[in-house]
Every structure is written in structure tokens, then in C-alpha cells.
Image (cartoon, rainbow, N blue to C red):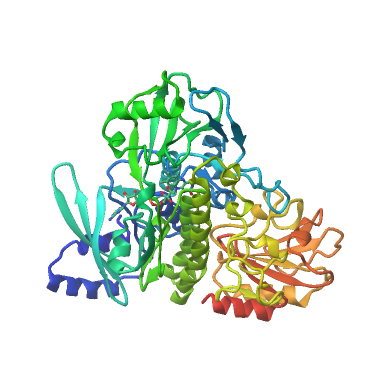
Amino acid sequence: MPTVSQVWFILLNDSRAHEMTILLQLLQLLPDEPFSPHCGAGPTGLILAITLALNGVHARVIERDTARKIGQRGAGIHPRSLEMHHFLGTASDILSSSSQIPQMAAYPIGGNVPIKTMDMLSDAAEPSDAFPTTRAVMLGQEKQVEVLTAHLLKLGGVVERGIELVSFEQSSEHVFAVLKRSGDEEVTEERAIFDYLVGTDGAHSQTRKQLGLSFLGETRKAQQMIIGDVYLRGSLTHDQPLWRIWGDMSSSFLALRPVVETPGLFFLFIGGPEASQSILSDHEELVCYLRRTSGRPDLDCDKPTWLSPYTPNVRMVDSFRKDRVFVAGDAAHVHSPAGGQGSNSGAQDAFNLGWKLALVVKGLARPPLLDSYNAERLPVIAEMLQLTSALHDKTFKAGLDDQAWKRGSHLDQLGVNYRGTPFVLDEIEGRPPSTSNCYDSRPSGVLMAGDRAPDASSLIPSRGVLTGDRLFDIFNATRHTILVFTRQESDPQASLVVQLLKAYPSGLFKSVAVLPSDSTTSLDVGFDLVVKDGQGNGYAAYKIPSDSTVIVVVRPDGVIGAMLTNCDGLHRYLDIISF
Ligand SMILES: Cc1cc2nc3c(=O)[nH]c(=O)nc-3n(C[C@H](O)[C@H](O)[C@H](O)COP(=O)(O)OP(=O)(O)OC[C@H]3O[C@@H](n4cnc5c(N)ncnc54)[C@H](O)[C@@H]3O)c2cc1C
């Protein structure tokens, strides 16, 4: 039995204008089935598709390539992305295949002993109760895409390969897309109609171009590089998990990282004026370059599994949205790979947009909620471009500066925040302190609406079911969690919150009362869950003042939507996000 959206698709697969008019009228008679597509099944598109699927919206995922892309590319997965994978249910598969970030080891030409070794994560914070994951891991983008595609499949989704978005137009109600399907023998054109379109179609995004979004910035042509994956033969083995480097970008530079998930494979990075682009097409030249730059005459390699030119670009859009069409990931921003922020930022774009889009297409929130996507992500990405450009300049300058290879703790993205943006509400701290920075909330010393919602362990359920003992076991990518921290035996605000939430469709919220560990009240007013804060970790992480009731709204993307003192505030917040 086809779903309503599939029926639309079949009916509208005809381009004759008069039939289109009739069909559009037909369409309006059909029930409003949630349906929004996006194109591009890289990491950004897949995370968006999984977020939507978990939220009950099966988007159509269109991918131009007929086969999955080979290659390591964005292999570094930062702690905030790992937390996102936890909420999406993809963490265990990502972690079981991934490996530690290896130490960098700089070798002299021809030498077997490193001149120096550098730990890129030496500045990473120690894990704590509120921040349990503080170290990035590594998993090639190819494998990430494989894991995410398998998860999407389990959720009933599918990637439609060999279909390219060619063009689109939009009205106030719909997006009309022209798609090209490349079959074995023929190329056919499809016309399809959607509620929304999200371009997750990478750096050369057709969506961005057609929207006419500016993509201002710079292309660093003088710093052309070559990246790829090769099986090496000779004295370099996988035995030592070292990211070996030789030379620097003033003449010739070579970096080889063992790909732990694929025995024998190395990720290759070549740069500097002596690295001729003819390496791309001439295998002999590649082998010569490897031997010359490393000073190891025994080095040899098979034909690379992939090899690509790479020119650093630093660019971003002026808006992540035009009416019913959005861009996310590399379609919206490109930058230096230094710091490994690209794929991680695309993932956070998708995670930010996914729950909002799901609520709107299901008719559970009004469209203004979608404005928050641009308001929240644009400043973060602008800051990220500055950070990665500065890091790029340090990393790829002449000489070997070990400071340049250090990755500050802010790159873990745990401090990325949306403080002071129009769709979060803080009635406790008020305005963000002047020291606030949208890439790192931690130095300001306060916790505010817009920040990552901290974890806390040792929760003891006194009413309702809790699997696990952490706040991260309660937060969920498909609903808002309303935490009411209260010490009072019969707190009128607690009752009001429960009453208010009852007026909304079930499943939108989970109400959780968090009581101090010594509390004797059972707070029997109808919360979905009542927990005691066994070790006081929750009260400490959320900086709850003594003798106050604090309501914390945690969004499906694990961000604090609101910090409030009473139920009127909750009313205001729900109004702001257009419920
Ligand atoms: C050397 C290097 C190292 C990097 N290291 C890191 C790192 O450690 N960590 C990190 O976070 N990032 C890193 N990055 C960046 C990362 O690779 C990108 O940010 C990431 O690939 C972006 O994912 P995406 O899904 O937005 O786009 P893409 O991965 O480019 O996916 C876009 C998809 O859209 C498809 N498509 C394009 N046009 C159309 C169309 N018209 N119709 C249908 N489909 C279409 C494409 O075929 C593609 O599959 C690195 C990049 C490089 C080059």
C-alpha cells in the first residue's frame, strides 16, 4: 500500500502544465502527509535523515552517486558529535569501529626516530560527570557513511542513489523539483513536489547556487594539496599507531596516518610547492614523491584507492535558508580541514534542523520555528571559519611548530552555544555575559539557555521508569525534556508545569522532577518521571541555587531551550518556539 506521499509522487511525475494544475488541486484534497526531501547522502544528509526518521518523518534522500564514496576525508569525530550519536542511537556502532586519535610524529628525512611527537588532544579536558566524553575519535568518512546508512535502513529509510537534483522552484506552499535519474541504460527526468527541500549536497551545492546564496570567502590556490588513501608496502606498518609527517609546506610535506579500521591502508596528505599535481595521474611520480620526501627508498604503494586534489577554501553562505529551501553541511560552509570541524559542524547543522523540520511538517509547531536554524547556526559557523583559518595558518606554515598541531579543547564543540538568540529563553541569567563566545560557553562560568545541556549521573527513580542513571539516558532526540528542579514538598510550580504540558499532544514532552537526594516528598502530581539526585550531580551541573525551583527545558538536540523560574516562563518559551 503506497503512502500518501508516494501517491503524490507518482501522480505528479508528469510535466504537462494543465495536468499539473489539476493534480495540484487534487493534492489539496489529500491529507497533509509530512514529507520533506533532501539531496546528498554524505554525513550531513544521513544525520538529517536519521533525525527526521526518529521523529516519524520519512524524508526522501536523493544521492547523485550510484555508489558510496570511498575515502577517509572527515575522519575526526569530536565529543559533541559523539553525544549526538548517543541521542540518535548510532554511538555504539560508530565507537565500535573507531580508534583513538594517533600521536603526530615528525621524522627527519631518512630517519627512523621522530624529531618530536605531538599529542593533538593534549589540551582535552578530563572527562567529568557533566562532560563524560572529552576526547575525539577517528573513523573514516566512508565507514561513517556506511554505519549511518545502515541505521537509516533500520529506521525504514532509504538512500535513493543515482538521482540528481537538477533544479527547483518554490511557491509559498511547495517546492517543485526536477530530478535526473541515471539508470543502467537511460537517463530519465522526474518532476516531484515537496513541502521542504534541504540541500545537503556538499561544497559544490546545486541547491545553494540555485537559491542564489552568496558564498563569500577565499580560495587558497597557492596551497594546493593532494589527499587520498593508499596501501603501502615497505618499512611503514600499522604496528605503531602514529600519524607520521615529513617536511613542511614551504617545500614538500607528507603525512601518513594508518587507517585503523582497514588494515594496511594509510590516509595520505601531500602539500608544498614541490608536490606536483601530476602525482594525481602518474603513479611513478607518486611513489617517487613518497620516497623523496620521507627519505625511505623502500616505500612503495599500490594504486591509491582514491586520490584527489584539495584546495583550501574558506567560504560560507549569507543565509542557511530561503523560504522552503535550506542548506546544511558543506553546502553551507567550507573551510580548512585543520581542526577537523567540517563534518562535525555539518552534523550539528543537521541535528539542529531535524527536530524543528519534523515538528513543522507534522503540524505540531508553526513554521516560524524554522527561522531559528539560521539564527543559531550562522554565528557559530562564522566563528568556526575564523578558528579553522587561524589553525590552518599555524599548521601549514614553514617549520615545525608543535603548538600548531595542538587542538584546543574548544574544538570539541561541547561549548558551542546559541546564547542570546531569539528562540531560547533565559529568565535566570538574562543576557549572556560580555565574555560569551558562541563557540565556547565554558570560560564564562555560567550555564545558560542555548548551552549544551550537561549530563549528570546517579539519578534514582522514585516514580516512573529510568533505564540507566543519567540525564543523558532521559534526553531524547524526539521530544523536549522538561526538568523541574524542586526542593519543595508541594511545589505549586511543579503542578502547574504538569497541567500545562497536558494540554499538548502526548509524546512532545517528557516531564521530569529532579529532587535533592535527601528529599522525602514523592511529588505525586503527575510527572512522567520523578528522580532523586543521588550524588547532587544534577543540581551542581545545572547550578541550581539553594531553595529555588528551576525549570530547565532541554530540546531534542540536547540544547537548553529555556532556564525558567516558573510556569509562566514555560508558557512564554512554548510560545516562542511556536508550539
Ligand atoms: C583532507 C580533509 C580532511 C578532513 N577532515 C575532517 C575531520 O577530521 N573532521 C571533520 O569534521 N571534517 C573533516 N573534513 C571535512 C569533511 O570531509 C566535510 O565537511 C564533509 O564531507 C561534509 O559532509 P556533507 O555531507 O555536508 O557533504 P559531502 O560529504 O560532500 O556529501 C554531499 C553529497 O551530496 C551528493 N550530491 C552533490 N550534488 C548533488 C545533487 N545535485 N543531487 C543529489 N546529490 C548530490 C554528493 O554526491 C555527496 O555524496 C575534512 C575534509 C578534507 C578534505
State whether residue 342 is above or below residue 245. below
Task: Name the foreground residue: 148 vs 290.
Answer: 290
Task: Report whether residue 364 is seen.
Answer: no
Quadrant in the rendering for residue 431: bottom right
Question: Is residue 179 rendered to the left or right of residue 346?
Answer: left
The spot of residue 34 in percent (x, y) is: 38, 65
Q: Residue at x 43, y 30 (%)?
A: 293
Count of numbered labels shown in the rendering: 0
State whether residue 9 is above or below residue 122. below
The spot of residue 17 in percent (x, y) is: 13, 72
Task: Name the foreground residue: 72 vs 468.
Answer: 72
State whether residue 345 is above or below residue 543. above
Question: Is residue 224 rendered to the left or right of residue 390?
Answer: left
Task: Report whether residue 303 is seen.
Answer: yes
Task: Name the foreground residue: 92 vs 78.
Answer: 78
The spot of residue 47 in percent (x, y) is: 45, 53
The spot of residue 526 in percent (x, y) is: 70, 68
Task: Name the foreground residue: 294 vs 411.
Answer: 294
Q: Quadrant of the N terminus?
A: bottom left
State whether residue 254 is above or below residue 389. above
Q: Residue at x 52, y 55 (%)?
A: 390
Quadrant in the rendering for residue 249: top left
Question: Is residue 559 rendered to the left or right of residue 274?
Answer: right
